[in-house]
Image (tube, grey):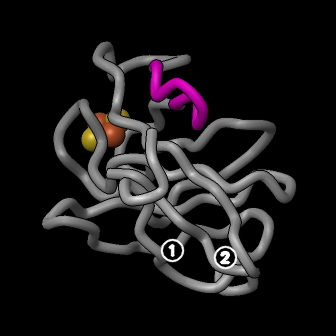
Amino acid sequence: MSDQDFIATVPLDAVPPGKTKAVTIAGRDLLLCNSDGQIHAIAALCSHADEPLACGRIRLGWIACPAHGARFDLETGEPLTGPASEPIATYPVRIIDGMIEVAA
Ligand code: FES
């Protein structure tokens, strides 16, 4: 992953712990998630029925889909509980000068 692959999105303080922020990068709709200070970038839609994950509850490294409750590991995108059986995409994140940068 080279420096050119990373694109600045929003300031770190725009995504407080337990919150999400929707961003679009290179035509992809992503969701930035803050789990206990750790920032993750994931696909904006659930793999179960394409519902938005934006209002999902974030806890201990996972996000719960608000539609039917599937939980996804924020690091790997793997489903931790049903009804989802497919992973969601995750993207590399770095923080540079207080900005969240994502490679998508
Ligand atoms: S759309 Fe997310 S669990 Fe059904």
Q: Write the start and end of the magenta stretch as one range.
A: 72-78
Ligand 1: image quarter:
top left
Picture coordinates of residue 52 (x, y %)?
30, 58
Q: Residue at 43% across / 47% down in the picture?
A: 42
Q: Residue at 45% across / 31% down in the picture?
A: 70
User: Is ligand 1 closer than 8 angstroms to the Cβ of mark 2?
Assistant: no
Q: Nearer the viewer, residue 76 or 102?
A: 102
Picture coordinates of residue 34 (x, y %)?
70, 60
Q: CA distance from mark 1 to mark 2?
A: 6 Å
Amino acid residing under circle 1 = Lys
Amino acid residing under circle 2 = Val
Q: Is 34 situated above or below 22?
A: above
Q: Which residue is mark 2?
A: 15
Q: Which residue is mark 1?
A: 21
| Tag 1–tag 2 contact (CB < 8 Å) | yes
Q: Is residue 52 left or right of residue 14?
A: left
Q: Residue at 80% across / 38% down in the picture?
A: 60
The answer to whether residue 8 is magenta is no
Q: Residue at 51% across / 43% down in the picture?
A: 92
Q: Is residue 3 left or right of residue 26?
A: right
Badge 1: how crowded within 10 Å, few (<14), some, or many (20+)?
Answer: some
Instruction: Give the SS element for disc 1.
Output: strand
Q: Nearer the viewer, residue 80 or 5?
A: 5
* Quarter of the figure that contains the N terminus: top left
Q: Main secondary structure of the magenta part?
A: loop
The answer to whether residue 76 is magenta is yes
Picture coordinates of residue 99 (x, y %)?
64, 79
The disc, 1 or 2, on the residue closer to the chain's N-terminal end is 2
